Image: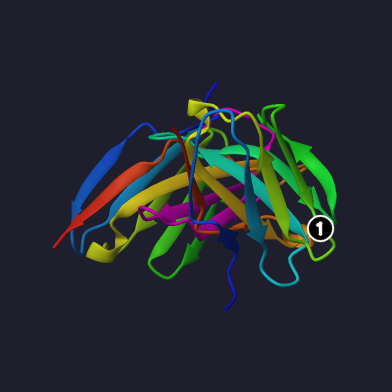
Amino acid sequence: DQQVKQNSPSLSVQEGRISILNCDYTNSMFDYFLWYKKYPAEGPTFLISISSIKDKNEDGRFTVFLNKSAKHLSLHIVPSQPGDSAVYFCAAHPSNTGKLIFGQGTTLQVKP
Amino acid sequence: AAGVIQSPRHLIKEKRETATLKCYPIPRHDTVYWYQQGPGQDPQFLISFYEKMQSDKGSIPDRFSAQQFSDYHSELNMSSLELGDSALYFCASTLRASYNEQFFGPGTRLTVL
């Protein structure tokens, strides 16, 4: 039972354009959502997060949008850079535990 | 800035052997999480500790045990290793008071032959 789903295994965009990575969840008890970036042979690196009481959080080139009614969140990267090429994981946890439930990941390729 | 340290980075074991993975959290972090990532899969939560006590448990086999020590480092002990235990094992740390952002170590790649 995949509670956090990233339905696009891969995404390819041109440098300078916007990258949009999507994530859906099923557990209404989730109240905190995070995006991690992962390079091969490295641990996940925290990117940005959002609480369920907000619908948007922005940090530099990264913006996360949360639509609670649709149980959907997205990560926007503008402008995309070749160094952004990596696997992006969406993760979530409910308020009473810090254990993260991860999506399957989306491999982003930013072409020069 | 200091990050989460995991050792060893790579480990090769035979079936039925034992393995011990170590995690040193970021200084002042009191909470440690262990995750297992199989080939082509997303990380799966195994177990977590807060102030040296087990705080949560996920899909961790009975053959595995873990603990957190007084200096907050943690060890994951794995016995009777099976081929299916081959995976990347990540440790993450955070401050319980703000446990929303977990900081991950580089992982230990365990290969069971």
Q: How is the image coloured?
A: rainbow
Q: Is residue A55 left or right of residue B113?
A: right
Q: Secondary structure at mark 1?
A: loop
Percent coordinates x, y for residue A87 in the rendering? 36, 49
* B60 vs A34, nearest the viewer: B60
**A43 is within the stretch colored magenta:** yes
| Residue span colored magenta | A25-53
Q: Residue at x 48, y 53 (%)?
A: A36
Compared to B113, does A44 lie above or below?
Answer: below
Residue at 32% in and 53% down:
A86
Point out residue A57 in the picture as x, y percentages from the top left corner.
52, 60
Mark 1 Cα within 10 Å, few/some/many (few <14, many 20+)? few
Residue B15 at x, y percent in the picture: 53, 29
Quarter in which the C terminus of chain A is drawn: bottom left
Q: Which residue is mark 1?
A: B69
Three-letter code for the amino acid on which mark 1 is drawn: Phe
B43 lies above or below A86: above
**Front one among A25 and B74:** B74
- Nearest the eye: A32 or B58: B58
Q: Is residue B27 visible?
A: yes
